[in-house]
Amino acid sequence: MRQLRIDSTMLACAVHEDMDPTNYLQFDKIRDFPPPAISLEVWRELCKRWNTKGWLNKSKNGSKNRRSADSSGKSSRHTGGSMGYAERRARMKRKMNEEPNFKQIFLDTHLTKECKQKLWDGDIDIYNLEELKFCTERAKKVYGDYLSAMREVYGPNYSEFPDDPEVWARVVGQGRTRRVYGIGSSDLDYLVTGTSSSSVGSAPSHAEYQQSQEEVQVMRTQMVDLEARLEEERNLLTTRLDEERKAREELQQQLQEFMNNWRPPSN
């Protein structure tokens, strides 16, 4: 979604010279400049939803958190962008042709870009702490502590066991609080094991999970619904215009027939 706002801002800056090209929240102006593939009606509705006190405060707090540095002086907490864990899990599954484990997802969002590429090229193993390069010292420490804790719990062959959400929560020292480092406010059990903590013997579908957990999925659903309503309104308008056109044609035909049959009175 952020990229859409950036694209719209660039389009608007070409017309409004007084705009700040680095401020992507100027909704009163960018509302008239929809990015490619999005209709003007849908874009204006999205800008209306974003241009609220609640959403703007959330965006401001998110930017502040992203700028805050950890003990290493690095401000980037992860390299996953705005994509949620559920969506990333689904994309990685399609790419790998198998269900990714939590360690792979965590590394995909907390390694440097160069190291991440080496990892997926097969040049680095997910258990090689010496070669794994993290975006923050905290991410490196937590991941290393997690591997050590898994070894303590499951023994030297711990890599053969599935990831354990209880071990992860204990390592980061936050227990099962509302927000857990490396996971945020999402379901701890689902993201670590692929099974929801509220499920009974089965994992929820991605559609159900994303609908309740992922803002981006909610926004996409809203866009689809809005497009459907607009399409219905356009169809109704087209039907009404066709009916009016046919009525005019019939009236013109009747008038023409009347004129053809009319004979002026003889003197």
Image (cartoon, grey):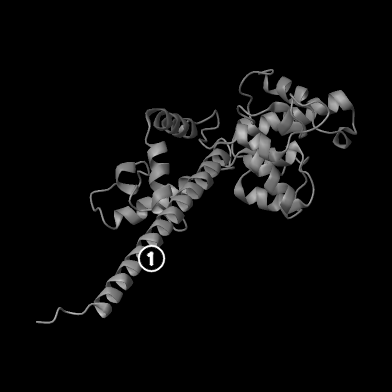
Q: Which residue is at a point 58% across and 41% down the rendered structure image?
A: 217
Q: Residue furthest left?
A: 267
Residue 238: image x %, image y %?
A: 42, 59
For mark 1, give the secondary structure. helix
Kind of residue at badge 1: Lys
> Callout 1: 10 Å neighbours few (<14), some, many (20+)?
few
Q: Position of residue 152 (x, y in %)?
A: 85, 24
x then y, percent, for residue 209: 67, 34
Pick whichever, 98 or 74, lies toward us. Answer: 98
| Among the 4 quarters of the image, the one containing residue 145 | top right
Is any part of residue 229 visible from this angle? yes
Q: Which residue is mark 1?
A: 246
In this view of the protein, can residue 82 be seen by the observer? Answer: no
Query: Which residue is pictured at 32% across the width and 73% down the height?
Result: 253
* 242 lies above or below 103: below
Q: How many numbered discs?
A: 1
